[in-house]
Image (spheres, grey):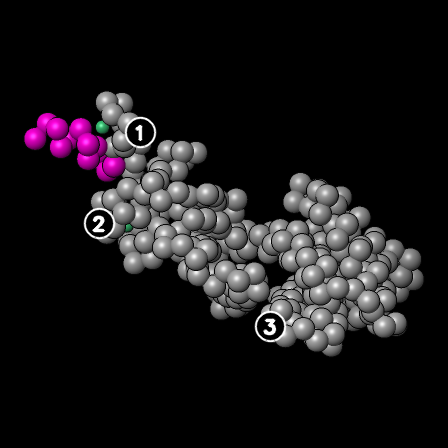
Amino acid sequence: MSKNSLVKFSLIENALDSIDLGLDYFYDATKEFTPRKYKQCLINMFHGSELILKEILSRVNIILIFDKNSLFKICKAPMTPTEDESYKLKSIDINSLCDEVMKHYSEEFKGKLGIVKGLAKERNKIQHFAIEISPEILSKLLSSLYIEVFKPSFRIILSEIDYVNQYNSIIEKQIIGAEQKFLKIQGDTDNYLALCPSCENHSHFILYKGTGYPVETYCICCDYKNEDIDMSDYLDCPECGFPSLIFDKENNAGVCLNDKCYYGKEGGFVEMEPCENCDGFIIEGSCPECDKDVD
Ligand SMILES: [Zn+2]
Ligand SMILES: [Zn+2]
Ligand SMILES: [Zn+2]
């Protein structure tokens, strides 16, 4: 284990712990509004955003999270600080941190980090003065922070986990746990986790949103998603027999959204393509409509 990875490990653990704690306060505050809960939530969520941005930046190069003057003043070799030296180094401030993240992850965070700078102001106010902000506005800010900053960061972290050992699986579990807490805060308790047919991680959220069938799915590891699924989109799955199969146009394949089905657990995509002879589909080699006519 290198000295740099020690620094990295404590960063990500602290980031996920702060986010987890912040989400607990957030959930409590939505149940029963108290200024103290919102204050704790804001402080922890903000701290979590600072740490998680440092975490992903340190993956590019650990020296990026430190103030340059302090690197040159304290380190014998400023490009490769030792672990001992790193404890004495000054970190860059939140605005520089956002700018630096934008330089290295412009696609992932384009137009999204303004929220961190905005919350930095609220955090400073809350620490020094009596804060006056409506719970509705604060809730919106915190939800945006989760969606615009935490989610892309989680995705970067998850996409770099290429093998699962005990340590990685703890990180994965914590990120999935954060997503479940966030869904609960939004009132989406009606969901379950399945295999993502695209990246094949077990990070595909299936949301019912109070209806009797899944209406939306998304993977927190990759871009994969299905939106606005209509009841009429569902066809019978060849494996489980339930009307839980949808056609994914982009991948020219089927996806079964039954949580008990082999495909949703480990099978992934179902072989499926539009039928040329009817407006149905050929599923696993045969079209239920046309083949019925032949019989
Ligand atoms: Zn995926
Ligand atoms: Zn099925
Ligand atoms: Zn057909």
Q: Using a 10 Å C-alpha cutoff, classify the residue at mark 2 as few (fewer than 14 neighbours), some (14 to 19) or many (20 or more).
A: few
Three-letter code for the amino acid on which mark 1 is drawn? Pro
In which quarter of the view is residue 50 placed? bottom right
Three-letter code for the amino acid on which mark 3 is drawn? Lys
Q: Residue at x 31, y 48 (%)?
A: 244
The stretch in magenta equals 283-295
Tell me the element at label 1.
strand
Q: Residue at x 48, y 49 (%)?
A: 218
Tell me the element at label 3.
helix
Q: Position of residue 110 (x, y in %)?
A: 70, 42
Q: Position of residue 48 (x, y in %)?
A: 70, 65
Q: Using a 10 Å C-alpha cutoff, classify the residue at mark 1 as few (fewer than 14 neighbours), some (14 to 19) or many (20 or more).
A: some
Name the one closer to the observer, 228 or 33.
33
Q: Position of residue 25 (x, y in %)?
A: 65, 73
Q: Residue 27 colored magenta?
A: no
Q: Residue at x 12, y 28 (%)?
A: 293
Circle number at residue 94: none
| Image quarter (top left, top right, bottom left or bottom right) of the C terminus | top left
Q: Are marks 3 and 2 in contact (CB under 8 Å)?
A: no
Is residue 59 visible in the rendered image? The answer is no
**Of label 3 and label 1, which has the lower sequence position?**
3
User: Which residue lies under the disc numbered 2?
Assistant: 241
Name the one closer to the observer, 234 or 210.
210
Q: CA distance from mark 3 to mark 1?
A: 47 Å
User: Which residue lies under the disc numbered 3?
Assistant: 31
Q: Nearer the viewer, mark 3 or mark 2?
A: 3
